[in-house]
């Protein structure tokens, strides 16, 4: 069946486009309010912040991921206060995630009703999780981010050693598997605002449930995009993000994707993944040590 041509799937793609426009309008309005209150426009991204956007989106395009790597780099170079890191990443990377989601939803065959329900479950979790994250203290955020990075390291290691489930051939889940997937997607949505990406966990879960891993991509991409939209709007409203760094992710990310596509066949990805894993692990340890100290730093 040509799932990508069904009205429901086109509705999801249209909703993504509308969400992108809505998000941009909200971001521009918030930037103007900040400029008005401060009496000057916020500074543009520095070359270093543009480089962060380029490098992390480069990694994301190669399948290494961007949330954990961005968190690690922000932490290592002290570019963004710890409590603002999740919101900055979600706001800055959202448009790229939306574009990827629209592509996969439009071309990969998967049950459209299940796809929509799983996205809604993730969005509900994202709304709940963002409400919690925007109220966390600096110390709680450090502990949460550190734990999130350790989870990311675990899934990176699983992928590096080829331990991901092979998946099945199904394009739709059985009723029992679908019920479990709804619960898992809700939890992943709730964890997304804290910095735990849903891509790697989704591949593991849907593979174990027997879904064709190709069919898992529109689910995880669509879930992440819509949940991040909800989270991004709430982060904007509460100003739990850093404008300058978020702009660096947006403007630097575009050439990062282009470079990755150009070099993807010639890069030693195995060695690159080892380096990324080591950097993320170091950042996780430093965050947890800071959060557990008497005075969060």
Image (cartoon, rainbow, N blue to C red):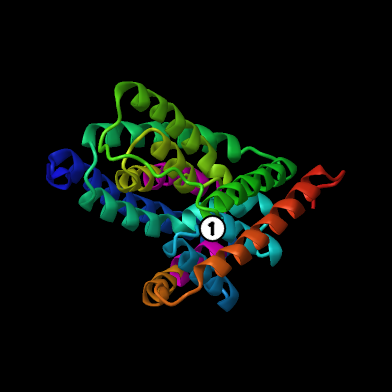
Q: Which residue is mark 1?
A: 34
Residue 269, percent across and down?
Answer: 50, 68
Q: Is 78 drawn above or below residue 6 in the view shown? A: below
Is there any visible trace of residue 42 in the rendered image? no
Q: Main secondary structure of the magenta part?
A: helix
Is there any visible trace of residue 114 in the rendered image? yes
User: Which residue is most to the top?
Assistant: 176
> Where are the magenta residues, as a range?
224-252
Left or right of 285 in this view: 226: left
Residue 189, percent across and down?
Answer: 47, 37
Of residue 196 and residue 87, the one placed in the foreground of this image is 196
Q: Is 79 drawn above or below residue 21 in the view shown? A: below
User: Which residue is most to the right?
Assistant: 294
SS assignment at label 1? helix
**Residue at horizontal 58 percent and vertical 43 percent from the top:** 194
Mark 1 neighbour class, 10 Å CA radius: few under 14, some 14 to 19, many 20 or more: some
The N terminus appears in which quarter of the rendering? top left
**Residue at horizontal 79 percent and vertical 50 percent from the top:** 290
**Residue at horizontal 44 percent and vertical 41 percent from the top:** 202
Left or right of 227 in this view: 131: right
Residue 241 lies in the magenta stretch: yes
Left or right of 217 in this view: 58: right
- The quadrant holding residue 75 is bottom right
Left or right of 169 in this view: 245: right
Residue 271 lies in the magenta stretch: no
Residue 154, percent across and down?
Answer: 60, 47
């Amino acid at each position: 069946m040509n799932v990508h041509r069904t009205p429901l799937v086109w509705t999801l793609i249209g909703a993504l486009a509308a969400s992108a426009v809505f998000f941009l309008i909200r971001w521009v309005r918030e930037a103007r309010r900040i400029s008005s209150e401060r009496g000057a426009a916020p500074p543009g991204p520095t070359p270093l912040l543009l480089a962060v956007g380029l490098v992390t989106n480069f990694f994301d395009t190669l399948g290494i991921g961007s949330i954990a790597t961005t968190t690690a780099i922000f932490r290592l170079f002290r570019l963004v206060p710890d409590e603002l890191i999740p919101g900055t990443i979600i706001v800055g990377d959202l448009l790229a995630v939306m574009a990827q989601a629209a592509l996969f939803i439009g071309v990969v065959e998967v049950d459209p009703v299940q796809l929509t329900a799983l996205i809604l479950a993730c969005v509900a979790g994202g709304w709940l999780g963002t409400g919690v994250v925007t109220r966390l203290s600096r110390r709680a955020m450090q502990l949460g981010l550190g734990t999130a990075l350790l989870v990311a390291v675990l899934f990176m290691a699983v992928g590096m050693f080829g331990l991901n489930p092979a998946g099945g051939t199904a394009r739709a889940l059985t009723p029992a598997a679908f019920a479990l997937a709804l619960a898992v997607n809700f939890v992943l949505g709730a964890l997304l605002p804290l910095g735990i990406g849903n891509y790697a966990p989704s591949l593991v879960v849907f593979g174990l449930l027997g879904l064709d891993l190709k069919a898992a991509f529109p689910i995880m991409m669509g879930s992440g995009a819509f949940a991040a939209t909800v989270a991004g709007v709430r982060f904007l409203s509460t100003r739990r993000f850093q404008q300058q760094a978020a702009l660096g992710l947006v403007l630097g990310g575009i050439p990062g994707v282009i470079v990755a596509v150009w070099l993807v066949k010639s890069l030693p990805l195995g060695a690159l993944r080892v380096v990324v894993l080591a950097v993320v692990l170091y950042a996780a340890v430093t965050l947890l040590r800071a959060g557990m100290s008497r005075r969060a730093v």
